[in-house]
Image (tube, rainbow, N blue to C red):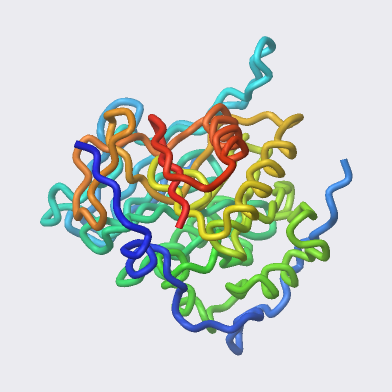
Amino acid sequence: MRKLWTPLLCVLACGGEGPAASDGTTTGSTTTTTTTGTATTEGDATTTTADPGTTTSTPSTSDDSTTGSTTGSTTGATTVSTTDATTGVQECAGELPAHWIDGIDCGSEPQVQVHQYSADTWILRQSLCTSFEGPFMMLLFGSERALLLDTGDGGIPIDDIVHGLVDDWSQAHGGAPIELVVGNTHAHGDHVAGNDLFVGDANTSIVGVGEAAVRQFFGIDGWPEQIVQYDLGGRVLDIVPLPGHEKAHIAVYDPATGVVFTGDTLYPGRLYIKDFPAYVASIGRLVDHLADKEVCRVLGAHIEMTNTPGDDFEFMQPSHPDEHPLELELAHLLELRDAVEAMQEPVLEVHDDFIVYPL
């Protein structure tokens, strides 16, 4: 039976603000204080080496292998993006694993699953055994810098894991040091808890978690209407302000893969909405921005739905048997846009792959 949980429970346990953090860019003595990437107003497969004891598997042929160590590594084959001439939808260049860690066996499940989505993109999932949120984190590489989106809910060595991936990528591309930019889709605690672990690290910049810090770092003068571009070096991302779930929320569209990273604004689960008018405007702005773009997948930051249409897991459930896939499509974003725009008053509304959940 589907179970819906009260807004009060969400405020207390799933949507609260994160740990105290500076509203500006947080840096250490050896940290780069200002990124060298450009942010301008929009005008128009290497296998990861896992920690000792972990197993690397290929999701196209088998389920992910996991161990009791800190990380589990999976690798997907990399292909070239193509576009369907009929639909205009970009066919996916990256691959997702056959199975995400789901909290079923905490004795063997790693703290973090590390999956190589494509040659320059990694997806990390924190184990439900360490946090009922089970958040996802994204690591995107360009030729000059890498962007980490979110740092998890704490209790995991996310800094060691990410720095290891950055070092491996750098060695595979000539060995020159590459800057790591640590940012967040938004400021809630289950997405920023690991930020402080990166303070003082060499070749690392940390984006502040507040709206003012996000605006300053990416050069967004006209928040939230202005969409800017951020260059990782040969890989230019679109940074889309997306307040509604949280006031400093952003989405990231990556033309290189055709993926839209939507954080907590859209994912297979309960879409908690704090500021409904801002949320409606944000969804409409994102849809409009993507109208002439090639979209392959929509990837959020959680999974809270089962594989049964309209059925969500219990709040704070420590394991997710028969979990919904992480990936959604552009059609789901359009479905969400139509649903919230049609509401004269905010109401809880259950869809097959997500639940509109105003607070």
Left or right: 150, with 293 as reference point: left
**The N terminus is located in which quarter?**
top left
**The C terminus is located in which quarter?**
bottom left
Residue 174 location, quadrant: bottom right
- Where is residue 106 shown, x and y percent of the image? 14, 55
Q: Residue furthest front?
A: 344
- Where is residue 7 shown, x and y percent of the image? 37, 59
Question: In the rendered view, would you say 333 is above or below 43?
Answer: above
Question: In the rendered view, would you say 188 is above or below 298?
Answer: below
Q: Nearer the viewer, residue 250 or 78?
A: 250
The residue sitting at 35% across, 42% down in the picture is 74
Left or right: 185, with 60 as reference point: right
Q: Is residue 230 visible?
A: yes
- Where is residue 151 shown, x and y percent of the image? 45, 65
Q: Residue furthest right?
A: 43
Q: Is residue 177 visible?
A: no
Q: Residue furthest bottom?
A: 29
The residue sitting at 41% across, 41% down in the picture is 355
The residue sitting at 38% across, 29% down in the picture is 352
Residue 52 location, quadrant: bottom left
Residue 247 location, quadrant: bottom right
Question: In the rendered view, would you say 199 is above or below 129?
Answer: below
- Where is residue 285 shown, x and y percent of the image? 71, 44
Question: In the rendered view, would you say 56 is above or below 164?
Answer: above
The residue sitting at 59% across, 31% down in the picture is 334
